[in-house]
Amino acid sequence: MTLTDEQFEDILAGGPCPEGLPHADLARLAQARALRLRLRGAFDGVRAEASLSARVQTALRGRTRGERTSPWRRVAWRWIPAAVAAAALIVLVPAVLRVAAPTPAAAASAQDLVRIHENNLAAAGGFFPADDRERLLATLRDKLQFDPVALPTGPDVKLQGGCLVRLANRQAGGYLLAVGDNRVTVIVSRDWPDDLGLSCSCGQAHCTCYHKGRCSGCNLVSKRIGEYAYTVVGDAPPAQLQAILARIPA
């Protein structure tokens, strides 16, 4: 099911969240909740001066001293402080929204993913070789909060090294594997495969299908598992890359 606007607002107000929501709705709810918390935190530090109301009323009395106070002025004295506060919020809210709203993630491309694989093959800067396995796994765990035991398993799989890189404006990890006769890089990033420029047959946004693409002589197969996209890059046929990805424990 997909949430209507009314259901979305009810959930944000504390109502129950239905089970089985699509990932797009879950992501939308998470973003709205995060924005609400950031707005609340921003306004916690906004305080009007205690003398503001007194200064406004004193100024009004000074302008009308000696005149008979009309009913509308008495109403004005009562409500102007609230109006001033409301005006301050009108000015502040757009500014806070600009500061607190999540910055759209920069888009990564298939070429970026292929470049990570090529750097791993060349053991370029930042590459951790196989004899530094524990350092690589500890770095992935520390920097990505990613569980490094989630690697393809099997007697024909050998970890040859890996790296920690920037993918667009986010950190990602890429580990180089020898799987039989193939050398592939598995890239772990906090993305959805369709945001990486890869496509699947269902056509839905943020689904958990296998997504595929081809770039610079390499095939790419990606799947969302938990909070990460796992993307296998190599020159092996897509079916073989998908078989490698299927061996990653969920």
Image (cartoon, rainbow, N blue to C red):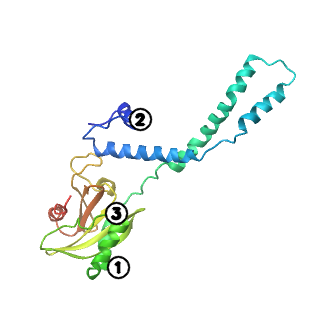
**Residue 247 place in picture, x, y as percent:** 16, 63
In the rendered view, tell whether residue 42 sits above or below residue 164: above
Q: What residue type is labelled 3?
A: Gln
**Residue 137 place in picture, x, y as percent:** 29, 72
Give the crowd class for mark 3: few <14, some 14-19, many >=20 residues within 10 Å: few
CB under 8 Å between discs 1 and 3: no
Specify whether residue 115 is in view.
Answer: no
Residue situated in front as seen by the camera: 195 or 186: 186
**Residue 41 place in picture, x, y as percent:** 52, 47
Mark carried by residue 13: 2
Give the crowd class for mark 1: few <14, some 14-19, many >=20 residues within 10 Å: few
Closer to the chain start, of discs 3 and 2, is 2
**Residue 248 place in picture, x, y as percent:** 19, 63
Assign the N terminus to one quadrant of the image: top left
In the rendered view, tell whether residue 49 sits above or below residue 122: above
In the rendered view, tell whether residue 168 sits above or below residue 99: below
When asked about the image quadrant of residue 233, the answer is bottom left
Task: Classify residue 141 as left or right of residue 47.
Answer: left
Q: What residue type is labelled 2?
A: Ala
List the residue tagged with mark 3: 145
Mark in front: 2 vs 1? 2
Give the crowd class for mark 2: few <14, some 14-19, many >=20 residues within 10 Å: few
Q: Which amino acid does label 1 sit on?
A: Ala
How far is disc 2 from disc 1 in space, using C-alphas?
A: 50 Å
Specify whether residue 145 is in view.
Answer: yes
The residue lying at 26 percent from left, 53 percent from top is 199
Closer to the chain start, of discs 2 and 1, is 2
Residue situated in front as seen by the camera: 23 or 212: 23
Closer to the chain start, of discs 1 and 3, is 1
**Furthest residue in direction front, as rendered:** 50
How far is disc 3 from disc 2 in space, using C-alphas?
A: 30 Å
Mark carried by residue 124: 1
